[in-house]
Image (spheres, rainbow, N blue to C red):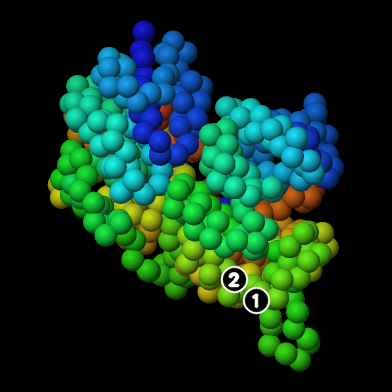
Amino acid sequence: MHRIAVIDYGMGNLRSVSKALEAVSNNASVVVTSDPQTILSASHVLFPGVGAIRDCMAELKHLELEQVIKQAAQEKPFLGICLGMQALLTHSEENNGVNTLDIFSGEVKLFQPAKNADGEKLKVPHMGWNQVYQTCSHPLWKGIEQSSRFYFVHSFYAAPEDKQVIAGTSAYPDDFAAALYKDNIFAAQFHPEKSQRAGLQLLENFVNWDGQS
Amino acid sequence: MALAKRIIPCLDVDGGRVVKGVQFVDIRDAGDPIEVAKRYDQQGADEITFLDITATHAERDTMVHVVEAVASQVFIPLTVGGGIRTVEDIRRMLNAGADKVGINSAAVNNPEFVREAAEKFGSQCIVVAIDAKKVSAENEPDKWEIFTHGGRKPTGIDAVEWAKKMVDYGAGEILLTSMDKDGTKSGFDLALTKAVSDAVNVPVIASGGVGKLQDLTDGIKLGHADAVLAASIFHFGEHTVGEAKQQMAAQGIEVRL
């Protein structure tokens, strides 16, 4: 039986993620935990997060979870969401600069003030439903229509050095990485747990994923 | 590809029950927040906002249970406003499954509360709700003041300046209600909406006055709102959220269909 560990490090709303996972997994158990052993013995690991990156990294350090996450990200199907995706890059501009886990080489950057083609001011945070263009075929995109909309809420975005790790892009107004992948890791800037059908499909795909891409 | 403008149905909840006459003909219990939220989710609502109008503190726990129940069945963003006064109030709602909380009077009483909340939970979940009324005369430049206590109590604070200040303090979104228009079904106060939306760099939700579908489109096109909130136009079954989106899309607005 699958056992999915949702990493609890005190950053925001884990109930939505665990409820959404429970809704899509018939024979998997979902456990919200900060215990290293529980995380490392799970079949799947989900690394969620909302809030600011400095607090996020401070909490991971405090709970001694940095190495645990790095190890889990090497061993088993691993899904990072929102801040849990940004923390996988090398460094973030947020909070005057914070070093992050460096699982994907690259920087997390702030959206600059911009206008769209109609001259309309684009607000920050980028908040709401945007289309995600799937730039590769991946088990986690299975059954999700190309360019489906997902729910985003973020002011910073991931800019990986290697564009080959991008699994999906969105535009605001320029293209940015909405999802990343590498081996057994998938990461989404959007919130699948708040993205209705398409989001639940992605989570179901994750639960059923063996980590091969 | 672009970010969609959002439609947000708003439910008033009193003691755990939806009030102000939700009248879906084909729903088993129109007072059940879960049933109503599920219906709006099926119609394509982009988010749902609950306004807790429960008068007594003792019944506040009820709202927590409502949020828990809805959040385990409806997988779109949920906002809870009404009676949010402390960091602990916010924590309880977020832990119950809310994604954002709306802060209104507590922000006016103590602006530092917004800063504290944003630092603790992140700006993305802090919505500052502003109730504004026009106070300028016909021949004067437009000016709006914020009111508390359901529009009864003037504060002397300029609405546009207040919105800017709240963003500086960490508000991630502004829910802007025109007290002049609320309940009139004569459309949003477009000048107010535009003044606030153009003045801040965070999303603005227009609220108060929707009587027909075109009002929603106008709020976005003319009021520059990023999202539109409405209650009665959807509650009474006059229109579905889907119809509203079709109408907006026909006029060139990007929506999630």
Residue behind mark 2? B162
Identify the residue at image location x=29%, y=31%: A63
State whether residue A30 is above or below residue B61. above
Picture coordinates of residue A92, whole percent (x, y): 25, 52
Left or right: residue A59 compared with residue B40: left
The image's mark for residue A89 is: none
Residue behind mark 1? B158
Q: Is residue A209 visible?
A: no
Q: Amino acid at mark 1?
A: Asp
Left or right: residue A137 compared with residue B246: left
Identify the residue at image location x=37%, y=69%: A113
Q: CA distance from mark 2 to mark 1?
A: 6 Å
Picture coordinates of residue A84, whole percent (x, y): 32, 39
Q: Residue furthest top?
A: A1
Quadrant containing the N terminus of chain A in the rendered view: top left
Q: CB of mark 2 within 8 Å of CB of mark 1?
A: yes
Q: Residues within 10 Å of mark 2 (few under 14, many from 20)?
A: some
Quadrant containing the C terminus of chain A in the rendered view: top left
